[in-house]
Image: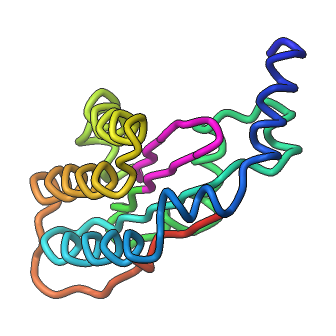
Amino acid sequence: MEEPNRLRRALRHLLSTRNEAERAFPPEALTAITEAITAGEQTHRGEVRLIVEKGMPLSLAWAGVTTRQRAIALFADYGIWDTEDNCGVLIYVNLADRKVDIIADRGIDRKIDAATWQGVCDTMTRGFASGEFHAATLAAIAQVNQLLRQHFPSGGARPNELPDRPVML
C-alpha cells in the first residue's frame, strides 16, 4: 500500500469514534439484531455472530491488515469455528473502512459459495451508504438465516452455542 494511502487509512481508523459506532448501531438496533439472530437460529443449525468494529487498532490498520484478514482473526478469537456442526458464520462490519465481510465455517463453506456471501455483504454496504445501518443489517441477517435454513435446517431443539448479541469493538 502506498505511504499516503496507508497514512490516510491509519488515521481514519485512529479517528473513528465509539459515538459514531453507537449512532450507527444504537441499543434498540442491537436488541432487534439480537432478536433476529435468536429467532433465526431456532430454524437452522447455524450459529450467527455479528461483530461491528468502529476501526481496527492503529497497528493493524498501519500494517495494512485487510478487513478480510481481520474478520478471519476475529472468527478465531471469538471461537466461531468451534461449533458442533461446523456451522458458525461471522458477519464482520468495519465502519472505518466501510466494509463488510462474512466468514463461514467449513461445514457451511462447502455448500454456500463466495458470490452468495458477497450478495449478503452488498445488501449491507448499500444500506449503510444511505445511513440505513439497522434495516440493512436486519435484511442481511434474514438472508443468512434463509441460507442456513435451506442448507442446515433445524433438527429440533439444540443448545445455543454462541452468544447472539452483537459485539461492538
Q: From this view, report whether residue 124 is shown above or below residue 27.
A: above
- 39 displayed left or right of 62: left
Q: Which residues are magenta?
A: 90-105
Question: What x and y, as percent, mark residue 148?
Answer: 20, 56
Towards the viewer: 73 or 2: 2
Question: What x and y, as percent, mark residue 14?
Answer: 82, 46
Please state, as top left, top right, bottom left or bottom right, where the C terminus lies in the image.
bottom right
Towards the viewer: 86 or 52: 52
- 97 displayed left or right of 50: right
The residue positioned 83% from the left and 36% from the top of the image is 11
The residue positioned 13% from the left and 71% from the top of the image is 43
Judged from this view, the residue extending furthest toward the top is 2
Q: Quadrant of residue 131?
A: top left
The residue positioned 30% from the left and 48% from the top of the image is 136
Q: From this view, report whether residue 120 is shown above or below residue 80.
A: above
Towards the viewer: 122 or 68: 122
Please state, as top left, top right, bottom left or bottom right, where the N terminus lies in the image.
top right
Question: What x and y, as percent, mark residue 42?
Answer: 17, 78
Q: Quadrant of residue 2?
A: top right
- 148 displayed left or right of 135: left
Q: From this view, report whether residue 94 is shown above or below residue 98.
A: below
Instruction: Give the overall secondary structure of the magenta segment.
Output: strand
Tag count in the figure?
A: 0
Colouring used for the render = rainbow
Question: What x and y, as percent, mark residue 49?
Answer: 43, 65
The residue positioned 72% from the left and 49% from the top of the image is 16
